[in-house]
Amino acid sequence: MSDNQVILRGRLVEREALRHTPAGVPIVRFRVAHESTQSEGGVARKVGCEVRVVAAQTEARLLAGAPLGSDLRIAGFLDRQGKTGKQLVLHATRIEFISDN
C-alpha cells in the first residue's frame, strides 16, 4: 500500500515560529481553514474543516513569513502526529500562494 496524497486549498489561520529540529532541519507548524462545496452521492454539500500542517526545509522557509489569511494550495501526505499519536497531520511537500486577482 503506497497511495497517500492530499491536495488542499485553504486560508492560513495560525502559524508557529520557524524552528529547527535537533538535526538542523527548519520546520514550521501551522493550521489551514478549508471551506468548499463537494459532491457526495450526487448531492452538493458544503464542507469545512481546519487542518494541522507541518512544512520542512524550503516550504518551511516559504511559509515562515506568510501573513495570516494567505490563500494557499498545499500538496503533501498524511501522517500521525508524533510516534504514538492518533491525530492526523498534513506534511506539506509543496505550497503555493493563490492570488485571485
Image (cartoon, grey):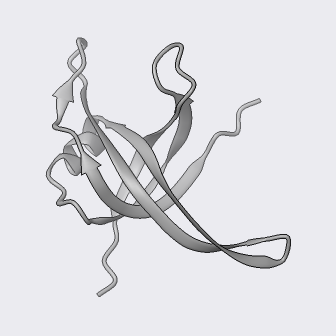
Q: Residue furthest right?
A: 41
Q: Residue furthest bottom?
A: 101
Residue visible at 52% across and 20% down?
85
Q: Is residue 1 above or below residue 76?
A: above
Which one is nearer the viewer's eye here, 71 or 48? 48
In this picture, residue 41 sits left or right of residue 5: right
Residue 19 in which image quadrant: top left
Which one is nearer the viewer's eye here, 52 or 77? 52
Residue visible at 27% across and 65% down?
70
In this picture, residue 12 sits left or right of residue 76: left
Residue visible at 16% across and 37% down?
17
Residue 100 in which image quadrant: bottom left
Q: Position of residue 28 (x, y in %)?
A: 26, 37
Q: Is residue 15 above or below residue 74?
A: above
Image label count: 0
- The quarter of the image holding the C terminus is bottom left
Q: Position of residue 65 (x, y in %)?
A: 14, 52
- The quarter of the image holding the N terminus is top right
Residue visible at 20% across and 43% down?
61
